[in-house]
Image (tube, rainbow, N blue to C red):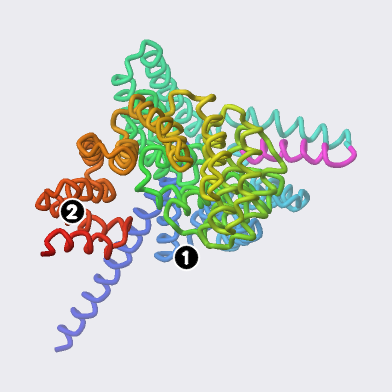
Amino acid sequence: MLEQHMNSNKNIEIDNIKTEQDRKSLVYKTLEQARIYHEKYLLRSNSSDLETAVNYYIQAIKQNPQIPETYYRLASLMFENGQISLDSAIEQCKMAINIDPKNTNAHLYTGYFLKLARDFDSAEKEFQSAISLNPLKSARPRIILAAMLYEKINKVKPSFIDFLRMMYYACSGCLTVLWDFASLKMMYKNISDDALVFMYKSYGGFLEKIKNSSLAIATYDSAAENTGRDEYFYNRIGDICIKEHAPEIALDAYKKVLEANPYDRTALIKFATLIQTYFPEKQDDAIDCYTKLLEIEPENDKVYYELGHLYLQKNESLSAVNAFSMALEKDEENPFYHNSMAFALVQLEQYDDAIDHYQKAININPDPYWTSIVCQALGSVYLEIKENPEAAIVLYQTAAVLNPDSEESHIAVGDTYFSLDDYDNAIKAYCDAIKINPENAKSYCKCAMALWEKDYTEEAIVAYHKAIELNPDYAIAYNNLGVIYLDDIGNIKEAIELFEHAVENNSHYTLAYFNLGRAYAILKENTKAAKYFQQALDLNAITNDLDDEDIRYRLYKLFEV
């Protein structure tokens, strides 16, 4: 029994040794992975490498909190990534010194962060400690100390002794670099990596110049895989694809850039612009891009402006108003921001505030053509919402003055006078529109309607025929001309032909079907009349253009005895 007990204790000791060895091996592997990705990040500046390295360092600390290297390296990465403050970075480096006071790099990193904090005296002590601990391999602390002394000289009254010390550390740092194998290794890797990148850039640039886009894209794709410089090479692929009108490939390329660095400003702008131009259904992705841009540039009013328009596209008017408000906080005198704010407020039915912003945009008047369009928009608010046609007419006329080539302004004036039964002024306005653009069928059609209301039947017929001549598919012109032939002239056959042209060009034209029913009812062709009245009734359930009771009355009357 005693022998068995002793064997059992031996087995426990052996298991403990194995467990300890396994634990050390695991820590070593974790730390090695962290170093690899840390080195990759230093060479390629790829944010995914940085995040992976940070995760491995944190894992190594959990496995063994007594390794000084993990603290100062983790501090440098997390500080660069904006995850910790300068004070926190200094504290982490001091923790590494507490674990191993003779660790050269711990003193070097602590000195570096103290230098950033402008605590030059404390930083110098740490650099001196790093130099004294390993004089032959002290190139980095010497060179950094020389740079710090140079900065210190520029900040305060220069001292000749400080100048001499700066020159001493700079020269000795250049000499000791020959024995600093870590620095030489990193220098070699930098040179070899840069040479490979330069080769790919040169070859790809040559292919772009000779217009061989497909091979250039393949070269840059291979370069990204072999060098890890995703940001540069996928950016180039995206730019080429934009020129070659391949937005899907460009979008995928910029997406890869953002995977490598989610806060690449240029890629964020390109990605968002591409979505807005070609992929409106991906609005949420564009919003994410602009939100990240605001993290980089919180004072950039243009980003808020773009966000506002994206929210408008999503029918999120309140969010749009908030975005435009932020843009106006940054630049209150921007007329475009006021105009967009006004449009968003109209969607929220806050009409008085909308009018105020429209007026501010008009008063700033950056460009007569643009201001003319804003005047028309404000005129529509006064006409349709405020029911103030007189104010609307003034605004439409102002728009016409600002942009003499705007036929739409004159048409809007004509429509407003027409709604007031002022047909003379309506005709004048429509004629002004025709003078500006004699090829606009809509102007002739509207003018014909006003002429008919004034009982100028022959002139109205001429105007409608001119509208049809300019636009042979103009269903409204066919229908309205058909009404004149049916009700004024009594030429039912001609009227039917015109109504049929109207429904040929617009199969959902309720009024034209109704008029066909009226025409056939006059001819006593009740079956055809009933067919068209029924079609008008069915369509009216969708369009609500007519009174259902009137259609039913006419339909039932066909078969009264």
Residue drawn at x 22%, y 54% is 536
- What residue does disc 1 label? 65
Is 401 in front, or is 242? 401
Image: 158 above or below 49: above
Count how many numbered circles sit on residues in the image: 2
Residue 195 covered by magenta stretch: no
Viewer-side residue, 232 vs 8:
232
Q: Which residues are magenta?
A: 139-157
Question: Where residue 379 sits: x, y (%)?
Answer: 59, 48
Asked if the residue at tag 1 contacts the one at tag 2, i.e. Cβ–Cβ closer than 8 Å, the answer is no
- Residue sticking out furthest to the bottom: 1
* Residue sitting at x 68%, y 43%: 362
Q: Quadrant of the C terminus?
A: bottom left
Q: What is the secondary structure assignment of the residue under circle 2?
A: helix
**Residue 458, position as x, y percentages in the image:** 40, 31
Q: Is residue 108 above or below residue 207?
A: below
Q: Which mark is residue 535?
A: 2
- Classify residue 357 as left or right of residue 244: right
Q: Which residue type carries mark 1?
A: Pro
Reading the chain from its start, which is encountered first: label 2 or label 1? 1
Around disc 2, counting alpha carbons within 10 Å, would you say few (fewer than 14), some (14 to 19), or many (20 or more)?
Answer: some
Q: CA distance from mark 2 to mark 1?
A: 83 Å
Quadrant containing the N terminus is bottom left
Horizontal side of 32 relative to 188 (left or right) equals: left
Q: Estimate the x, y position of residue 58 in percent, counting from the top left.
A: 44, 60
Q: Nearer the viewer, residue 161 or 507?
A: 507
Residue at 70%, 49% (x, y): give it. 332
Please indicate whether residue 71 sits to the left or right of residue 173 in the image: left
Q: Quadrant of residue 325?
A: bottom right
Say if residue 40 shows up in the picture. no
Residue 292, how many percent across, how many down?
Answer: 51, 50
